[in-house]
Amino acid sequence: MMNMKTTCLTAIAALGLLAFPACESDSSNKSAEAVEAESAQKASQEEGSKAGASARDKAEEVAKDKGQKKADKTDNTGKADDSKKGKSPKTATVGKPAPDFTLTDATGKEHTLSDYKGKMVVLEWTNPECPYVQRHYKANTMSKTHKAIGEDVVWLAIDSSNFVKPKHSKSWREKHGFDHPVLQNPSGDVGKLYEAKTTPHMYVIDKEGVLRYQGAIDDSPMGKKDSPTNYVKQAAQAIKNGEDVPNKTTKPYGCSVKYEG
């Protein structure tokens, strides 16, 4: 008796066909199907692995992007930068380095705050048309204060009125006979940098360039006290003595700064 394979070959020969593989046994067909199944399973596993890796990469990219955005946001607020040693904050803050600026006085001379590092500096926001300023200049409050704290202290008046003109500042200086320059800031950018609200509004900066006081010239807005506390003198003396300034911030009084717009 011929086996199945021999019978198949005989039948094929009779028909003139050569499709020998089609006559393999059932066991051979099962083996091919198993191989095909294994290949499909392997391909599926590889595809799943690639998909998992892609998902992980995407998750890492999103996390990295969020971290960068957070860092950028911190930089934009200035908090990170301001904490760096020696870095000026975006607005004047007591206890922090005073923001640098350059302005021209009524005679055309430029003054850059950082050029005065190593000296104490007093900034006085002013406006000759303000009654409060007029009262203090009539009483020589600024000149007397400057003399009391020492002529080695740099005193800079700043006029951020949108209508300020050099010729008016020169005329006012000649009228009252004071020595300190009047810096011109009609754009108001430096006034806003220091958040100057009134005239007068005073600031005291130590020799290291750190803002140590900001606020009123004294505690007598109406000028009725016989012996008012001069906050600028108080702050300057404390700094010179190596002491903590007792009143670091007070409420300024006077006319509002006449900013542009």
Image (tube, rainbow, N blue to C red):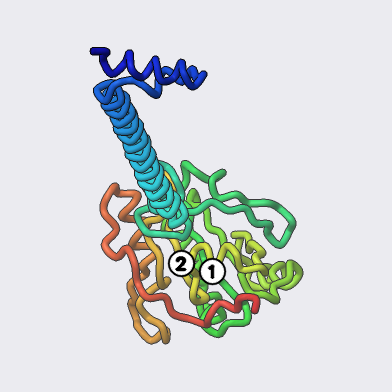
Q: Which residue does the numbered mark 2 point to in the structure image?
A: 202
Q: Earlier in the sequence, mark 2 or mark 1?
A: 1
| Near-viewer residue (92 or 45) | 45
Residue 195 % position (x, y): 48, 68
Residue 104 % position (x, y): 68, 57
Which residue: 48% across, 81% down?
A: 254
Task: Tell me where residue 156 sits by quadrant.
Answer: bottom right
Residue 186 % position (x, y): 67, 69
Which residue: 62% across, 77% down?
A: 128
Q: Where 71 sits versus 256, above or below?
A: above
Report whether residue 76 is seen. Answer: yes
Task: Tell me where residue 41 sits by quadrant.
Answer: top left
Image quadrant where one finds the C terminus: bottom right
Q: Which residue does the numbered mark 1 point to in the structure image?
A: 125
Disc 1 is placed on an element classified as strand
What is the three-letter code of the residue carrying label 2?
Met
Which residue: 37% across, 59% down?
A: 94
